[in-house]
Image (spheres, grey):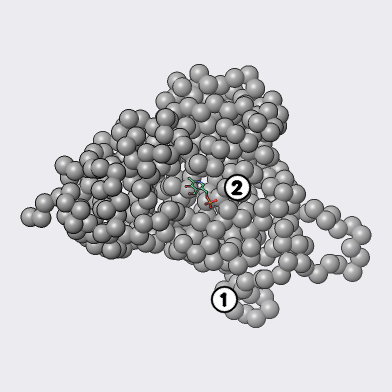
Amino acid sequence: MKKSTFGQEYGFQTRSVHTGNDIDGETGSIRRPITMANSYALPYDPTDVNWSDAGKALYTRNSGANQLYLQEKLAALEGSEDCVVLATGVAALSGVFFSMLKSGDHVVCSHVSYIAVYRLLTQYLPEKYGIEATLVDTSDLSAVKAAIRSNTKLIHIETPGNPTLNISDIEAIAQIAHEAGALLSVDNTFASPYNQRPTSLGADLTVESLTKFINGHGDAMGGAVLGSKQLIDKIRAEAMINMGGAISPFNAWLIMRGAVTLPLRMKQHNENALKVAKYLEALPVVSFVSYPGLESHPDHEVAKRQMINGYSGVLSFGIHASFDKHNEFVSFLKVITSAVSLGHDESLLVFLGPDDERQYLYPEKFHHGFFRFSVGIEDAEDIIGDINQALIKAGLLQEI
Ligand SMILES: Cc1ncc(COP(=O)(O)O)c(C=O)c1O
């Protein structure tokens, strides 16, 4: 049997290890190699070849070998019919919007979403293409329903949302979208398929930034959209073949390797983040902690229902301190690195100052600047110890 096609009949860990990999037919190596070619040999008579054919190794912008292997693995992890991998998570998101929408259409989107989505939907798509967008708090189902118009073609949500960890109910919003004749796309980057599989909850499209948890090692960029063959074929034709958002074979190979350990890493991210969230919540200097795994999160019950294995590795928190004290605290950290991105093996923390352009969309507690913290897979005690010693050095916590 071809291991590369292991599907839902096998467990998530088995699929993570085997699907997409197989014995290489030419060398017999038990790892499929990186195929750094941008073109593939044509048949004897190429007159019948469709130059825009996808899914056949012809030209790497149509589909090269390593992209195909990665697509196989990701579709098996999500449990979706098809998958297209692209150069970045943003290429995947813009692929959804440009392929699914046309002038005169309307989109409803989570008001807390990745910054590029915010800009695409509030600037580029309305100004250049006459596509309208309404941003709402999608954790409030009545707000989602109220935002629907006769020309609504897509609802796009991000859950958990970046950077405030808002939770939206995928199943309920899928129902609202379908009753309105619209599609639902879900950015699943913060959860990863280990913790949440939106298409199994009724979403039409799942978007992943592969740059984050799925690759997990902070050394490659990629994006994916998953769903039915019919929708994915359209995105593949438009976003990859004709708009050129193809991933490099090397990045596809790196992400393929990273994804093998996704379940093991996610278990550790889930466990560490919950410990860190509980530790932070108990500190008087901490003004708030937003983590879907905490009972204090307003949508903990929804998260519990749809996040099957845990609440993932990202949280946000604030401290009662001056602007400069925030930076001083960060400067004392030794284990945790101050850098953007998330879902890497190492802990990454970013101070989102009060000048974020979307600030008016956040509730009061986020207004004074806060930290987005991607909790890594180091020892939880070392992560907590690092925060503790940096707070003490910054004079924000007393040594006991
Ligand atoms: C939720 C979410 N979606 C999409 C992206 C974009 O991914 P990429 O950086 O791979 O383009 C990010 C990046 O931080 C993200 O946090």
Q: Residue furthest bottom?
A: 27
Give how far apart the Cα atoms at labels 1 and 2 are.
30 Å
Is residue 126 depicted above or below 387 in this figure? above
Quarter of the picture containing the C terminus is: bottom left
Residue 202: give x, y in percent of width and height. 53, 36
Q: Which of the labelled discs sits on residue 92, or is there none?
A: 2
Q: Are marks 1 and 2 in contact (CB under 8 Å)?
A: no
| Residue 175 appears in view | no
Q: Residue at x 40, y 56 (%)?
A: 339
Task: Return the residue at label 1.
Answer: 30
Q: Residue at x 39, y 36 (%)?
A: 166
Is residue 343 depicted above or below 96 in this figure? below
- For label 1, count other residues whose C-alpha is less than 10 Å away and answer few (under 14), some (14-19) or many (20+): few
Q: Is residue 199 left or right of residue 68?
A: left
- The mark closer to the camera, 1 or 2, is 2
Residue 10: give x, y in percent of width and height. 49, 57
Q: Residue furthest left?
A: 400
Label 2, ligand 1: CB separation under 8 Å: yes
Q: Is residue 101 left or right of residue 170?
A: right
Q: Residue at x 77, y 62 (%)?
A: 58
Q: Nearer the viewer, residue 172 or 219?
A: 219
Q: Residue at x 57, y 74 (%)?
A: 31
Counting residues from the start of the chain, the first of labels 1 and 2 encountered is 1
